[in-house]
Structures are given as C-alpha cells and as structure tokens.
Image (cartoon, rainbow, N blue to C red):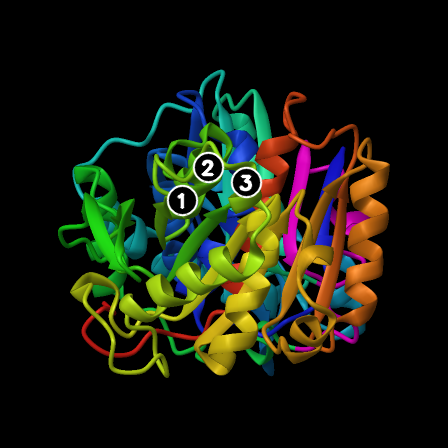
Amino acid sequence: MHVTGTHFTRFADRTEAGRRLAARLGHLAGPDTVIVALPRGGVPVAAEVAAALGAPLDICVIRKLGVPYQPELGMGAIGEDGVRVLNEQVIRFSSVTDGQLAEVERRERTELARRARRYRGDRPRADLRGRTVVVVDDGIATGSTARAACRIVRERGAARVVLAVPVAPADWAERLDEVADELVCVDTPSPFYAIGGFYADFSQTEDEEVLRLLAEAARGDPPGASAGVDRELLLPVAGVRLAGRLTVPAGARGVVVFAHGSGSGRHSPRNRHVAEYLNRTGLATLLFDLLTEAEEPDRRNVFDVALLGGRLTAVARRLGPAEGGPDATVPETRGLPLGLFGASTGAAAALHTAAELGPAVRAVVSRGGRPDLAAPDTLARVRAPTLLVVGSLDPTVLDLNRRARSRLRCETGLAVVPHASHLFEEPGTLDRVAELAADWFLRHLPRPVGPGSA
C-alpha cells in the first residue's frame, strides 16, 4: 500500500482540484491506465486527470445511501452490478431501521439506473481487465461510495486499483487501505467537515456538464477544449533577440517561464521534460534562451545574475501577466498568472525577476538552483511563494539553498528529492521534480483573467 498526501489548501473548484490531483498521478501515465469517475462531482476532477495522463475516461455510477433524517451522512452506498456496501456503525448510531434502509435503497437504485442510462448511453463500458484503474471522486467523507467503486472495478478485472481524491479526512488511509493498492490525496485537513467546505466553488455538477466532459474525453479533447498554441518565437530584449518555445494548452491556468543559466535554454531536455508535464496539468510554458549563441561561450555570462535576471524580467513583462504592466506583446498569455521556474544559475535570475516585478510573479520554483547567487537584498524583496527543490545527493547545493532560504521573507518550501544528484539523472527523480513544481504552481497561481484565460 502506498499513500501520498499533504496539508490542506482550499481549492477554487473541481477543475483546479483535478489539475492538482493530476500533478500527483504522473507516475501512472501509460497505455494500461483507465480513469473511472464517480458521477456527478467526480467527473470534472477525473476529466482533468484523464487529460493529463492521456488516459481514457469512464464512469462508475454509485449512489450514497443517506440517513433518512440526515441525507448528507452516508450509511452505505450502492453501485452498478448490484454492489452494496453498508456502514454498520453509522446505521446503529443513527438508529436506522431495516424498513428505512430498504426504502432509501429502493429510491437510490431507481436513480442509479436512470443516471447509468443517461451518462453512458450506448457507449460500452471501458475494458478494465488487467489494467490499472484510477478511481476518482471530488473528495471522501465516510468512504462508502469510494469503497463500493473500488469493489466494482476490482470485480470487473482491474489488475491494480488506485483511489485518488483531492481531499479526505486525515485517517482515510486507515479506513480504506484494504480497498485499493494505492491511495493518493492532495490534502488531508484536520478537523474534517463536509467536502464542500474545502472548495470555494462546490456548486452542483449538472448532468449536462457530465455528458459534455464524457463526450470530450471520448473524442480525445482536453476538458473545455479549444485550439492550443505551440510555436517558436523571437523576443527582442535590450538589443538582442532571444529564441523561445511557447506552449499554451487550451484553457491554460497560468504561464510558467523557464530560466536556465548554462546556455541550454529551450533545448534543455530536463527543462523540456518538466515543461511537458506542466502542459499536461493545464499550465502554459515558455522555454527560452537567456543567452545568444555568441554569448554562450563566455562562462562569465552564465554567472552574471544581473544580465540574466534583467532579460528574464523583460521577457516576463512581454507575456502580459495580470498586474504586469503595458509591455505585453504575446497575446496568447495576456492575463495569465505568471510563475517562474529556474535551474542552476537561472534560479537566481528567477528570484531577481520576482523581486523586480513584485505581485506580477505569483510563484517561483528552483530545481537544483543557485539562489545564493542572488544579492541578499534581492532575496529579502521576493514576495512570491518560492519552492527550492534539491537532490539529496547534492549536499553542497542543498546547504546553499538552506542558507538562501533563511534570507527569503516570503512563503518558502524546501523539497529534498531522495536519491537525486545535481542533474536529477537518476530514474524517477525528474518526474518527482515535475510533480512538485506542478503542485506548487497550481496551488499558488490564482484563476486567470483577461483574453489569455479560458
């Protein structure tokens, strides 16, 4: 049994929750993975997960059996194929009679049948035999519906069952560890109340939205699909022209600019790996060269934080972030919240830009970076939440990051990736960097505004 989770932060809505959950499920991407949503509220969450993992999306219709005089309290659940799961403790505590239970179950089975016909139509069920099945809902309270869903997919032949939700009680693993092979949760707040209390927008998911999302998934469209952008561009900055690669997925949540100080820029395979992961979670990315080909051979330029930071700042302004000023020349990103991802000396450049642009920069992530190269007064001026990611096998840089973190006056995090060296070349370590970065950006970038938003 493998369990992942963190501490609570409020979700804007189910779409954001799905993107943040998807950031924790990248290790499951592959041709043998199927996403199964619990309608209705689980479908918007699962649609984001399916799009990020490139996996098919199906549903498992479950109906909670609510206590008659307190229907939000689940005393059990029923599902397709005649599955029935009861919470005997809740039934005894609530003094529910056999007759009351039978009446609730009769009513809910009628609704279950209606929803199964409505949502699935003439589409066949996904073949789960021998596959990894990720069961997704918008949260867990008592766990009855999740237990029923996991039982159903297991009986349909799933080789591995993963239960994934944005929010659950702190003791959810103890309750559900026997129903799934892996449990994944973004947040486990304590105390835990109703699921809706952990969402800013927890309005009811309507049948029409469920049908739309299932249809989009069947066509292979991303949720809320419209044409995305993937193009090369040249950005004139201070007398030079810097080449970049801009990728804007449909419905982008924000834009992350990558800064690498070694001259590898937009061609860095490590940066591209992380950027592609961010794109799958709904974030736009710009990978660009901080140095021209003529400047790269001079190693002094690599450590010139003022030069690198000044160029990054100019490029960031051209993207037109909210609060970013009038210099925008890239229409696809105008109004998108801005994040910065820096590697090596690019981390110092990112912090330089965060200090210069103030509230226009909403989050910063450093991978194996050298934030210590930024001036102490620069570090003190950074207000954007900053995550420092370092490999456990990189003790010198780890110590430098700890010292730099002590000078920052913003929200900070230090993530040490086990068994990772400076370049994160060890198997799985760069995937972990991507997951950490996506979660940090999705947590701190606000909802976009303006023409660049969906």
Q: Amino acid at mark 1?
A: Leu
Query: In whole angstroms, how far apart are the C-alphas of marks 3 and 1?
Result: 35 Å
Residue 149 left/right relative to 3: left
Neighbours of disc 3 within 10 Å: few (<14), some (14-19), many (20+): some
Q: Which residue is mark 3?
A: 25
N-terminal label among 2 and 3:
3
- In this rendered view, identify the residue nearer to me: 396 or 389: 396
Taking the spot 33% from the left edge, 29% from the top edge, the residue there is: 126
Residue at point 56% right, 67% down?
Answer: 352
Report the label total: 3
Q: Which stretch is magenta?
A: 169-193
x, y percent for residue 128: 43, 24
Mark 1 lies on residue: 291
Image point 33% across, 34% down: which residue? 56
Closest to the camera, between mark 3 and mark 1, is 1
Position in image of residue 408 (x %, y %): 74, 72
Residue 40 in view here: yes
The residue under label 2 is 263
Q: Reply yes or no: does residue 182 show up in magenta.
A: yes
Q: Which numbered disc flags the more N-terminal residue, 3 or 1? A: 3
Residue 256 image offset from top left, x and y in percent: 42, 57
In the rendered image of this protein, does residue 307 appear above or below residue 261? below
In the rendered view, tell whether residue 234 sits above or below residue 70.
Answer: above
